[in-house]
Structures are given as structure tokens and as C-alpha cells.
Image (cartoon, coloured by chain):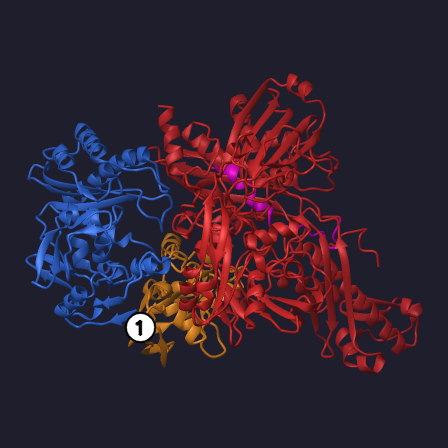
Chain colours: A blue, B red, C orange
Amino acid sequence: MQYMKPQTAAEVSDILARSEGAARILGGGTDLLVQMRSGMIEPETIVDIKHLDGIRDITSEDGGLRIGAAVSGQRLGEHEGAKALWPGVVEACELIGSTQIQGRCTMVGNLCNGGPAADSVPAMIAAAAVVRIEGPDGPRDCPAEDFVTGPGKTVLGKGEFVSSVFLPARPKAASDAYLRFIPRTEMDIAVASAGVNIELADDGTIKSARVAIGAVGPRVILVPDAADAIIGSKLEDPAIAALVRACEAASSPIDDKRGTAEFRTTVVGVLAKRAARIAMTRAGENQ
Amino acid sequence: MNFQSSSKQDFKVVGTRVARPDGVDKVTGRALYGADFNVPGCQVGLILRSPHAHARIDNIDTSEALALPGVKAVVTSADWGVPEDEGLRDVQDNCLARGKVLYDGHAVAAVAAKDMVTARAALKLIRVDYTPLPHVTDVDEAMKPDAPVVQEARADESVPEGSGPNVTHYCEFGHGDLDAGFAKADTVIERSFTTAATHQGYIEPHACVASYGNDGKADLWCTTQGQYLVRDLCAGIMGMEGSQLRVTPSEIGGGFGGKTTVFIEPVALALSRKAGRPVKIVMSRVDVFRATGPTVSSSMDVRIGMTKDGRITAGEAKLRYQGGAFPCGTVDMGAQAAFAAYDMEAVRTRGWNALTNRPKEAAYRAPGAPMAIYAVESVVDELCQQLELDPLDVRLKNAADAGTKASYGVTFDQIGLRATLEAAKEHAHYHAPLGENQGRGLSCGFWFNFGGNTSVSLAINADGTASVTEGNPDIGGSRASISMMAAEELGIPYDKVRTFITDTGSLGQNDVTDGSRVTFAVGLATIKAARAAIQVMCARAAKIWGIDEDAVIWEDGAAKPSGPNAGDFEPMTLAEIAAISSETGGPIAGHHEVNAEGAGVSFGVHLADVEVDPETGATTVLRYTVFQDAGKAVHPDYVEGQMQGGAAQGIGWALNEEYIYDEDGRLQNAGFLDYRIPVASDLPAIDTVILEIPNPGHPYGVRGVGETPIVPPLAALSNAVSRAVGVRLHELPMSPPKILKAIMAQG
Amino acid sequence: MKNIHVSTVLNGDETEFVCAPEETLLDALRGRLGMTGAKEGCGTGDCGACTVEMDGRLVCSCLVLGAEAEGAEIKTVEGMAVGEGLHPLQQAFIDHAALQCGICTPGILVAAKTLLERNPDPTDTEVRYWLAGNLCRCTGYDKIIKAVQIAAADMRGA
């Protein structure tokens, strides 16, 4: 095995393209080293991307924020601007692992791992985040909801890697929230999760919304029906009931060591309901 | 000097909260644990494990692995003989499979190589041909007559005719006329329960270094609860004489019963013998879960009858335990402990052990008791609910006391159950209001406590200090409590005593650190060793003074004439006597060897408040209080620590911890990510109330305290959750999906 | 397999070591530098026994490559006590019985120290969540939380 520290995106692409899939990106390493340890993967090359320009930065852009691929969860959580702009995304990212994991883990790594239970992903999708992909042909952008195509699978092609995620500008009277269910209070993988992003009209009704749910199918999904269920409402009981139904209907979970399908389906609705209420309250405070 | 007659009451050192002697080493990183030990030229040992739950081993080809440069040795079970002793053979077969693999993770072969990379590569080159066999992991399935047979013909003489092929052991305890008892009851409740297998969850994986010389002498350094047992097992497996194998224990990073046997130690010795080099094996966390011993899982039926005013008229329990792929006697302890808290006219418990394709059970804190008492205490609580009786009053009404004939045959001496129940009843916790979705549960707990073989040597040093040498690894602060008892007896300050835990070559036999025996038994032996040294010191003083030995007494750390008639001499302190010992007859020491009896049983009561989220089934433990009789709390902080630690383990068992197997019999959650032990944010403060009802069997009244506290949390939590959600739960762990399902089922 | 030369600052001292590319920082600390204070309880970031501070952030050293320590500042439990005195957290852990077997203690001390540097007056809940990645199987955490609070009060007073 070899360890490489490229300085530019082009170098990274080049290494990846040449390695025929035997190279792995090292950002925070909190998934990569676990996979190496278990023998699940045996990479020939480790590409440490932390030395690329701007990769550890959070920068303002068009009223939104660009989060570098090597920005740790803890660093994002310390960024007042990020917390004010997308509190749901930040709280989701801060839920990944322990304090120690927070010192290293990244939102981008969480996304690229391609797991359906990744904490930051439902929040990113609800926030309409955009993934910046670097590759042999230069950069391209991909909506977060389209990035993961199946368990462990992404749209990344040969020589491509993710350099940042863009969190767009947020309208006034809007906010987001993320909730997950875990058996303990910390240190678990989500058994079900929901991210909700809400924008209010002047009359206090929901003008637009995005709802994404995790750990209830092969990948995190955006649920337009769930958003439609609450648009035009103030989260009155019928709207909430419709939201819950839409989330339950969109779920296709499995029974596993972390929970039963039945449990996941029920709880994802509960989480969507609770997250919607938190987002609503936050949006109201931003009016 | 007869100290059995009365318990000492006034203490100078015992009962204080001194700093532990291993404290500085442990907070600075200086303390050396199993994996921290290294010797020059050490090879890396790695173990190949079965991917099958049950399979015949048709062939093992190690030639390619051996041919890999850097590989020094490969061993399989063929490198050992076949011990005649069944118990030893089972331990050996668990360390390296012989003929069949019996569970997912069962060790098959091992390599020693120059480094980890080479060792990993070598493991991959070992070819094992398996023929998979049908398997069984569930205890009720394993009991059936047509179940896959884990091992042929392993039933002992206790097993009734017609039992299933996996049943290895049967036991029965009790007294009185059950039918008559149940006939007297106003209400009889019978329920069935299951509990999952849980792991001790020590944070330190097993680790050892073995160095086998070509003269047949060997050294072994390892993390263990009992170096003597490790020596005896390893010597037996290796065909060595015990004197030729020296085992030195490291600091131990948690054991809880799980380090009372061997897994890797004989393998490391076999590799070292073959390689001619020292070999170090450190288990991975995955291997710890897959291949070291969890506790038993259980399926149980309990029937209890009660009168309207809360008198238990009869109780019956049927316990079915599985302890993995080898015979296991843990159900005996469950069957004896189940009704220990109650004074009953009619009681019967029966227990069965069945083989399954799971790792060999290892002791886990009060082995066998928590699940049995969980079932009993759940039914008692349901009876209290049905009859609208206060659950503490009902326990008090039926509490076992001095003179009670226990369900397992003994008659209790002085015990602390009533005192702990009364303390719980008076405590503010029991009377605090509860909110919506909240419930309060309680449970009694019990453990027998062990004594056992113990050897202690105590040296009086010329500078007036004392060194205690004992042979039981310190898992909960015992070096402090042993030093305290030595200081108390000698009449010198605590900091003048240092206690060392020694290798197997330095003392007589010491049983494993288990059964909550160390503070009791090693303490007892230390006190006796101190008294032996005191006798020598008194004799020296007598010699100096020219008076009769019998005319000298020991008081406040000094020899004194026993009275005016004995003579008028200034007292001679320990330091003064020690300083001139070389002129009065030579070094002064005392020692004591005993198979200690009179450990004194231990009772506790736990109160738990929980809140359950009715929409998700998530349980939050809001408040927790432990009441327990410690006999005499030698070091109250460490007694509290045992009570809190046991409670936390029991809470984990009740709520989230479980071994999960898939249909192929493979363990699904072999890691701390999905084997969910409580984390700091899961728990509330755990309050403790220590009762001190002296144990007549110990000079200071000490009882073991370590195991009892894991017993009550299972039922305390289950009773609290059941009351909070308004529906009875009969299965552990009460993970959120199970609780939510129960809530939704009641509509 | 070619070893990598790494220059780092370990507990304030410039330190160099060589390690294999796949070797973790934990293995390098323990195996190459003989610093066995950080323990391996799981190797997968689930137990926190290997916690060290790296450039001001807590990390599981089992999830960091040794090679990544190049130019970094690493602090371990071995660097907590200065001279003959113990760090107030270390003293509080001894005085208030916040350890039993002690295998988790180095990781917890390093983690607690970082917490108190960021938040000198945390609530019990904050301490519990900060330390949620440090498993302890002996104590039930009660005395750990109390010792951290006692040390925090002590440090605020100092």
C-alpha cells in the first residue's frame, strides 16, 4: 500500500484514474480506516486530499456556503454562519459519531460512503445541497438527492471525487431540522431519520418544503408527497397525518440488527412530524 | 486469637476513602495492561476462525502458510494431545477446534509470523475444507428432540431419559408442597420470559505473550482474572508440569467473569514452542465478541401464587439456559438464586442446559442469577399490580431473613435483605412523584458470594513498612482494600503498606478473582497473615524484654506488656521491632493459606424510574438508586463503584445489549457499534445506599459486593417500563422496537 | 511496503518516527514510540480508549494513519502531568474513585481535558454527551462525571 498527499485536484483525479479502483480517498478516515481494519477493502493507494487548497474551508458564495470536503463535523458545528443558515444540516452533521469522530468525520465522506443511514444526507437533500465533483474533465455539480444511486454506490465516475458541498442561500422565514432515531443516546447508526426544510409564506403557512428520509430504504430519498402534504398548511393535524402517511408510504425498509421494518416505518413518520415542527418553529423565528 | 467469634466494630483505616495504590499509574498511562507488554524478538500470533456456525473439518492444509517468508509456526489442535479430563478437553477444544467447528468464530488454526502484515497474509493461505452441518442457536429450538446435534453424548447423569440430544444437564431445587401452596393463593400468575445472551464487554481485549524455552520451561504474561487457573489449564493442555510454567498477570482492563478461562494463552504457548520465539497474541474486538464467552441466553416459565394481602404461597420456575457449544452448569446457579429473596413454604425450581452453536459461555457477574431473578421479580411485580399492593411492602412481607430456609437448601445466617428493603422504603426516591409516560420499578437481587483457595504472604520490612503479596488480579480496587485491612490489623498507616499481585511461582494456589471473593477471602487471609506477623513481633518484644510471649499484646501498632504483672516496659512499635529484627531472630513475616468459607450471601434492592416515548418505544432512565448490604464497606468509594457499575451493566442488559444471530448462525453484531453497551449520556446519576450488616464469617464483617448489583436492574427496568407503558414485557432486551410493538399491540 | 518518515510534535517535543503506510497513529504511538497510554479497545472508533488530541481536536488514534501525523501536534495522556504534579483531572479521578480497571481512563482524561479547555463550566449533560464516545464498563460513569466536575471547579478556582 502507498500513501499519497496530492496538492491539486488534477493530481487527485490523475491518481484515481490510474489506479483502476484500487485507490481510496482519505478525508476524515472515519469510515475508510474501519473498512480497512475489517478487511472489507484492501486499497493499494490512499489518497489524502486534506492538502488541497480550500478543502478544509467554509466559504461564502452567492448567499450560501461552500463546505470543503475535509471540513470536520466539529468545525462545521463551530461555524456560526453555517448554524444560522442551515441549522438542520449542521445538527445532522454533528450527530455523526462521537466527539472523537466529530474531530475527523466530514459531511462529504458521510455522503460518499453511500449508506442509507448517513446522518448528514437527509438534511443535505432537504436543504437542496449541491455536490461539487472534480474529475478529469474539470468540475461538475450534482444535486445531493441524485448523488447516491444505491447502497455504497454513487454517480462518481473514473477519476472523480467530491471536493465540496454547496449549501444554497436560504430565503427569509425558512429553516430546517433533522432528527434520527437510535437505540442509545449516542454512538449508534440511525434506525430511521428525517430531514425537513420549510419556507413560510407571509401568512405563516408553508410555502415550500422538502422532506428527505433515511435508513428506510436502499438510499436516502426525497419524498415530494411528504412535502406536498404540508405545503399550504400550518402543520395542523390533518397535514401532519398526511405527512406521516407519505413518509410511511415512501419507506421500504428491511429487518436487521438495528430495527424491524415495521418499527422503521412507524418511526420515520414520527421523526418527520417532529422535525417538521422544529423546522416550522425555526422558520417562524426567522420571519 | 480467635477472631471468628465477634466482628470488629471500631476501625481506623477500614471504612475510609483512601487513594488507590494503582491510581497514579492508571491516570498517567504508566499502568501496563495485557497488550502493553512486549519482549524482544516477539512474533505476532494470529488465529484463523470458522466462518460457519457448525461444520465438520475435513482437512487443514497449512503448507502454503508455512512456506510464506517470515512465518515461524502454524498450529492446529493436532499439536496438542487429547486430555482425559472432560472439562480441560472442552477448554482446549474451544481454543482450537478438533474435528468440528461448533460456532461462528471458533478458532481453527494459528500462525506466528514476524509482523502483522505477514501473519495476516499467512492466515489467508491456510486452506480449511469444511462440510457445513445443520446448526441451532436458540435455546428452545436446541431443546427439541429433533434439533441439530451440537455434540454427541454430552448429557451428564442428571439428565432425565427422553430429553433432547443437546440437553447436557438438569437440576432441581426446592421444598414444600407446591400444589397445596398454589391452592392457598388468591391469585396465581404464570408467565414465560426470554433473555438474550450478553457479553461482559470489558474494554480491554484478551492479550498475552508466551515464551517457551527449549528446556521446556515457559513464561506467560497475560490479562486474566486468575493466573493460577491460566497456569493449570495451559499446563494441562501443553502437557507441562505446573512448576515449569510461570504465569504473570498484567493490569486487567475489565473482566466481569469473562477472563476466568483461557482462549489465546495455550495457543500462544503452542506457537512459541514450535517457533522457538516468544509470541504475542492480541484479540481483535470482533474476535472478543465472536469467540470469547458471553453469558447464557434463557427461556423461562415462572408461576407464583399470592394471597390478597400479599403473602406468597408458592413459587415455581423452569429455567432453560444455553451456554454455547460446550456443557455449562450455569443454570444451577440460576435455579438456586431464583427465589432466594423470599421466605417460602413451597418452592421448586428446575433447570436445563442445552448445547447450541454459540461460543462457550464464560462467567458474567453473578452468572445465571440475573435472568432467573428477572423472571421471578417480574411476576411478583405483576401480582402486586393485579392485587393493588405496594411492591416494597410485598417484598418486606415475604423477605428472607436470618433463619429462613432458602429455596436452595441452606438456612440463612445474618443477611441484609430486610434492611435494604426498609432503606428503599424510607428513601425519597420511592416517594417522588412520577409524570406522564413514566414508571417506577424495583427488584431484589442476590448473589451467593464465594470464598475459596487463598494464599497471602505479608512481610514486615526493616523500615517499618509492610509488603503484602497476594495472587488475585485487582479488578475493582482490591489492592487498596487489602492494604487497608493489613494496615488496620498491624496498626500502621495505610501508606505504610503496599500490596503486590504476584506470579504463580511466588505463592500457593489462589482461586480466580470471581464470586465476589477477593475482598472477603484475600482480606481474611491478609488479616490472618498480619496476625501471624504480629505474633512474631510480640515474640521478639518478649525476647527483648525477657518476659513470656503470652505476656505481650499488640495494640495500636505496638507490642505492649499485657498488664502490670507482665512487666513495666515502654511499648515497642512495629517500626522499632522491625528495625532490629536482624538482631532478634531475622526477618519478620506472616503468611496464611486457606480454603475460605463463610463468605456470606449478599442482597440488594434497586429502584428505577423510566420514561418511555410512546411514539418510538425509547426508554430514558430518569433516576436510579441502589441499596445493598456490604457487610462492612472496607473502601466505601469502591463499594459504591461496584454498585454503580453493576447497575449500569444490568441496565444495558435490560434495554439494548444482545447477541444477534442471523439464519446462518453468524453473529451479526460483533462490535461496540451494534453491541450496545450504555454510554455516558444513556445513564442518570446512580445513587447508592450502603447497608452494613456484618458477615459473621469475616473478622471485619466483610461480604463480597461485586456481583449482586447486576442482578436487580433487569426486573427493575422491566417493571418500570411495564408500568410506564401499561403493558407487561416478558423479553430482554427491551429494545425500542419491542416496546413500541407492545404499545401498539394494546392499541 | 516502504515505511514513511513522520515528523510530529508529541506532548510538546519534536518527535520523529517511521511507520508503514497502513499503520495507524495508535500503532505508531504504541509500537514505534513505546507510548502505551493510548489503548486499543476496538480499533473502529467505537470505544474511545485510544483518544488523543491532534491539532487541538480529539481523535480516535485508531482512525488516523500514522502518516497523517506529519507536521501535527499530538497530545496523549503521557503529556498531561507536568513534573511531579498531576493534572487536576488526574488528581480528581484518583481522589474521587473515577476509575476501576483504568483501561478507559487515559482516553477519558484526554477527552475531558479538551472539554474543559473549551467549556470550563459544563453541565453534567454536556459532560455526558462529550464523553459518550468513551466507553467505560466498570463505573457506570457516575464517579467519572462527578470527578470531571470537581476538577472543572478546581480549575476555575485556580
- Residue C31 visible in the shown view: yes
Amino acid type at mark 1? Ala
Residue drawn at 16 percent across, 64 percent down: A17
Nearest the viewer among B274 and C116 is B274
Residue B460 coordinates in the image, percent (x, y): 74, 73
Image quarter for residue B154? top right
B273 or C140, which is in the foreground?
A: B273
Q: Position of residue B419 (x, y in %)?
A: 65, 40
Crowd band around label 1 with a 10 angstrom C-alpha radius: few (<14), some (14–19), many (20+): many
SS type, badge 1: helix
- Please tell me which residue is depicted at 60% across the width and 64% down the height of the picture: B18
Q: Is residue B532 above or below residue B361?
A: below
Residue B293 position, x and y percent, is 54, 49
Q: Is residue B540 part of the magenta span, yes or no?
A: no
Between residue A36 and residue B224, name the one nearer to us: A36
Horizontal and vertical percent position of residue A24: 24, 62
Give the magenta-colored segment's residue range. B697-717
Give the quadrant of residue C23.
bottom left
The residue shown at (23%, 67%) is A47
Given the image, what chain letter belongs to the residue carrying mark 1?
C
Queried whether the magenta region covers residue B716, the answer comes back as yes
Residue B709 relative to residue C127: left or right: right
Q: Which quadrant of the figure contains the N terminus of chain C?
A: bottom left
Residue B416, by quadrant, is top right
The residue where tag 1 is placed is C67
Relative to B278, is A75 above or below?
Answer: above
